[in-house]
Image: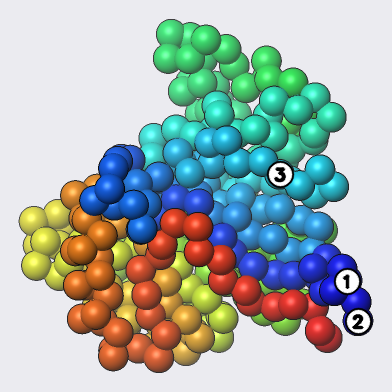
Amino acid sequence: MSKIADQAEIFSLTVLGARGSMPGEGRKCARYGGATSCYLVKAGREEIYLDAGSGIAGVKSAPEASVSLLITHMHLDHLVGLPFFAALGNKNRSLEIYAGYHQGLSPKEAIDRLISPPFWPCFIDDYPAKVKFQTLVTAKEINEFAIGEVSVKFMEGAHPNGCTLFRLSYRGKSLVYATDFEHSPEDSARLANFAQGADLLLYDAQYTAAEYEKYRGYGHSTPEEGIEVAKAAAVQKLLLVHHAPWRTDEDLDALEAVFAGQYQEVSFAKIGEEIILGEGEN
Ligand SMILES: [Zn+2]
Ligand SMILES: [Zn+2]
């Protein structure tokens, strides 16, 4: 198989932003990054962005790519980069945005509240790209749709105002995106079932176990709980995300060292890192 064909069939995840709640800045978080939630999944010619936090700002899509955006929920840190998403500025681009209802609002209604005067000078419909909204009806049961060859399973998670969990599968490999998730025996068991056998699990580890006691009910989790879900789901790799805004690179290095021996593959997401899940050899 030629190198070009391999590239065309790649399945990968790139971290464009893994900071939780609000952007961080400066040298203290240069390696793990200060940009809020955004991940790019490449699957053949599909470019599927997970959330539109500040990490999506300025990102350029490949000219030939088919571009979609999956939004887990409407909290600011997952949307603040959307007005700066380069794909919206291209009149030749069609873009599909998928999200659930939140507080009774469709994705279009929710985004029109945020990206509109006086918070922003225009609406999403005013951008040159052709944007199509797809509304997902989320529940505690698993539902499914497809983006090209990518199967997308989704399910309601556990977070104030709701948050959708996604599982993307392509040519026998799969990844699960479980950001803004707060553990409980029931919800952790549902997530472990949802993530069963995945090659990669992105899991909200905003707090340390000690901090968690203070922030119970805020809708986030810990590395310890992520490891429990990863074990129950027998996932290959656990990637901890949604880093607390106050956490420096040094703090995250120290936490990573603590958890390194506690699961077969576990690390905290670093901005710019790319994880290859499949190279299309089958
Ligand atoms: Zn968040
Ligand atoms: Zn949130």
Res. 279 mark: none
Residue 152 place in picture, x, y as percent: 67, 62
Q: Label 1 amino acid?
A: Ala
For residue 134, side relative to residue 163 (left or right): right
The earlier-in-sequence mark between 1 and 3 is: 1
> What's the residue at 21%, 55% (across, down)?
247
Residue 43 place in picture, x, y as percent: 73, 64
Q: Verify CB contact (< 8 Å) between mark 2 and mark 1.
A: yes
Query: Is ligand 1 less than 8 Å from the beta carbon at label 3?
Result: no
Q: Label 3 amino acid?
A: Ser
Neighbor class of circle 2 (other Cα within 10 Å; few <14, some 14-19, many 20+) is few
Residue 26 place in picture, x, y as percent: 28, 42
Res. 61 mark: 3
Q: Residue furthest right?
A: 1
Neighbor class of circle 1 (other Cα within 10 Å; few <14, some 14-19, many 20+) is few
Vertical placement of residue 126 versus 269, above or below: above
- Pointer 2 residue: 1
Can see residue 113? Answer: yes
Tell me the quarter of the picture where residue 23 sits: top left
Name the secondary structure under disc 1.
Answer: helix
Res. 5 mark: 1
Alpha carbon distance from label 2 to label 1: 6 Å
Q: Label 2 amino acid?
A: Met
- Label tally: 3
Q: Quadrant of the N terminus?
A: bottom right
